[in-house]
Amino acid sequence: MRKSPSQIVTTMLAPVQTSRPEPCLYWIGSAGAPSRCWPPSSDALKREGSPGLKVFLDSIRYAVQSVLIVDPFFDGPCGIRVAGECLNDCKARTVRILSGIRPRDWEQWMIDNKFVWNRPVEFRSRPELGSKVHDRFALVDDELWHFGSTVGGGFGCLSAASRGWFQFATDFRYVFDDIWGS
């Protein structure tokens, strides 16, 4: 027996809404709290320190697809020291780091500091990166982060990072893949 249109029940599923953070600026040293104040007080910076941006490090920790980092100066003291634990903890299928630092410098820092990767982390050294890429970026799943200093905020001077650049994630991935493959 054929049903009339009035007898057909259609279930429509609403698209899954994922909440995306708004673009935001973080002053490194502000313990991950968004700040639109300039300059941040030196007392606050001294009190809260600069262990890296908690919000950024948490985004790495909870990444599931990929973490892609381009930073000419991402090394042991300013990169791995800050982000290494979160990179080890993350469940992302792919973790890739493009740096201008020589592999032997990374390896020596890891030996000296007894740091061991407990997951696959792909590292490519591009010594010319520092003369061709000024900014530092991290793509965590589909969110693009931009850093004034080393990715993760490990550099000791006042700096800033911004997040929420979802509309540029695809373009960044093309650039990253191009540099990675060259």
Image (tube, helix red, strand yellow):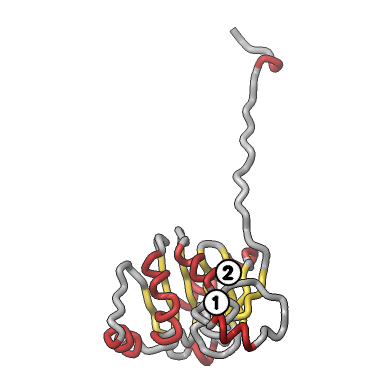
Element on which disc 2 rests: strand
**Direction from residue 136 to residue 67 in the image, left or right:** left
State the SS at label 1. Answer: strand
- Visible in this render: residue 181? no
**Disc 2 residue crowd, few under 14, some 14–19, many 20+, Cα 10 Å:** many
Which of the two residues, 155 or 29, is positioned nearer the viewer here? 29
Quadrant in the picture for the C terminus: bottom left
Question: Is residue 152 something that shows in the picture?
Answer: yes
Residue named by callout 2: 144
Q: Residue at x 46, y 68 (%)?
A: 67
- Horizontal side of residue 8 vs 93, given as left or right: right
Mark closer to the chain start, 1 or 2:
1
Q: Position of residue 57 (x, y in %)?
A: 49, 70
Q: State if disc 2 and disc 1 touch (CB < 8 Å).
A: yes
Q: Nearer the viewer, residue 66 or 55?
A: 55
- The residue to which callout 1 is attached is 137
Q: What residue is shown at x 47% (from left), y 61% (from top)?
A: 63
